[in-house]
Image (cartoon, rainbow, N blue to C red):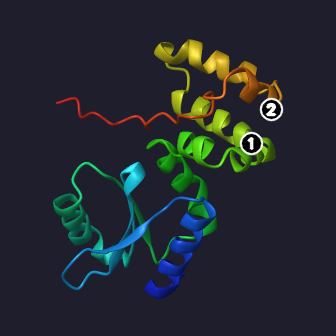
Amino acid sequence: MYNLEELYTEIAILLSTFMVLYKKVPLGGNLSDVFEVHELGVIVVGIEPLDYSYTMQKLIDKFPGYRYIILTCNDSMLAKKDEILWDLMRSGYIRYIRYKFQRQFNNMIQQGLGRKIITERVRIWGKEPKYKYLVEENLRCLNVAAPYLVAQDPAFFDFMPELPQIINGG
């Protein structure tokens, strides 16, 4: 468990580790600053758990259309790291890294991120018939060396599908 100041420090370190440019922007009122990753349209905010609804409304009002990554003082940054990465990917993060930091991109993919990306895609798509081809393609790619995949299709790792939305059937 963190206090807010420690949480903000952890968020700044994580975003720097991910090599994304961000700026701290005041949210207003008695709320603290948020981290805006403008190029990817992402807002990362650290809050006390009880402030969630109020903070969300402020985010929606001030940053409509952005992707919001909400972290609380109770979250473990180690446990949330992959979730944060997937959310950044849904906004184009891997493509951003591939173009801006080619060497780091290759290192990240070869050091296991490529495999994690494929595994997460397959988990999201599941056994839905509409994703059959994509699942089979990704499963085949688990048996291929990451450098070969990047050489054959540099954009293969660029995207992460959105999580399925729960639709009320009423």
- Disc 2 element: helix
Looking at the image, which is closer to me, 129 or 16?
16
- Classify 150 as above or below 108: above
Amino acid at circle 2: Pro
Percent from the top left, x then y, of residue 110?
Answer: 79, 42
* Dot 2 or dot 1, earlier in sequence: 1
Residue of label 1: 106
> Which residue occupies 19% across, 63% down?
62
Question: Is 141 left, or right, of 130 in this rendering?
Answer: right
Q: Amino acid at mark 1?
A: Asn
Q: Is residue 53 left or right of residue 45?
A: left
Question: Looking at the rendering, in which quadrant would you find the N terminus?
Answer: bottom right
Return the residue at label 2: 147
**Dot 1 lies on which element?**
helix
Asked if the residue under mark 1 is in contact with the one under mark 2, i.e. CB atoms within 8 Å, the reply is yes
Q: CA distance from mark 2 to mark 1?
A: 8 Å
Residue in the picture at 49% in, 19% down = 128
Asked whether the viewer can see residue 43, the reply is: yes
Q: Quadrant of residue 34?
A: bottom left
Residue 53 point in image, percent of width and height:
23, 67
- As drawn, 77 above or below 28: above
